[in-house]
Image (tube, helix red, strand yellow):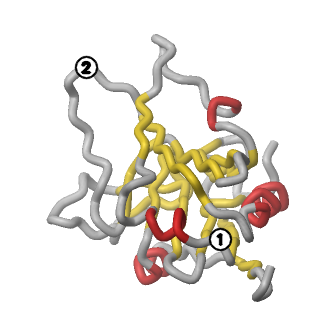
Amino acid sequence: MTTTEECRAAAEQLIGQQIATVHYVGLSYDPGTEVRWDFGSWHHPEVGVALTTVSGDSFFGIWDSKVTHFELTFACGTIAEEWLPSRDGTARTWDVSSHARWLPFLASPIAEAGISTAEPDDPPVRAPIAVRLANDLAEVWVAAAGPRHPPVGDPPAPDAMWVGFDEVVVLFDRAEAAWNKLEPELKKVAKGH
């Protein structure tokens, strides 16, 4: 079982590290099925996010149901350690390292990390629902959440999210994260470290 403290500790291990690669993991669909995941200020990878640092360390954020229905597991290691791919043994993964929203995290080390907790469902226990990472250029939230309705508009706003859900969204906007009550307890790195 991944505890709040374990999620916090994993996120805090990223402080001072620079991200080298970012991959999204989604559900597998029939060949030729196009799945939209980029909604401007937020992304919908569905299953999880895998990060690798310049030093070679791996981290992942994935929705889970070990504590309640549903929380976020953020941990050190590879996403394959936690998630089993579809029946045919494949997973839909794609590299988003060169996406404009992720480039700030490849350019500057993580300076802040924190987690958001809530009581998403049954049983009503406090569990991690999001991780926030920030540096001097940008901030990002990886959350166990999903859109309540099919996204509408271009770009659609994440104004109707199920938080504590069996999907993952990535938010890049502070106001949208706050609207969805993703307010983390933060740990910051001291200048010069």
155 vs 176: above or below: above
1 or 2: tag closer to the N-terminus: 2
Q: Position of residue 1 (x, y in %)?
A: 81, 42
Q: Residue at x 64, y 47 (%)?
A: 60
26 sits to left or right of 112 = left
161 vs 168: above or below: below
Q: Residue under circle 2?
A: 31
Q: Quadrant of the C terminus?
A: bottom right
Q: How dense is the environment of label 2, judged by Cα within 10 Å: few (below 14), some, or many (20 and up)?
A: few
At label 1, the amino acid type is Ile
As rendered, which of 75 and 183 lies closer to the eye? 75
As rendered, which of 59 and 121 lies closer to the eye? 59
SS state under label 1:
loop
Q: How many marks?
A: 2
At label 2, the amino acid type is Pro
Q: Residue at x 65, y 76 (%)?
A: 184
Q: Which mark is residue 110?
A: 1
Mark nearest the camera among 1 and 2 is 1
27 sits to left or right of 75 = left
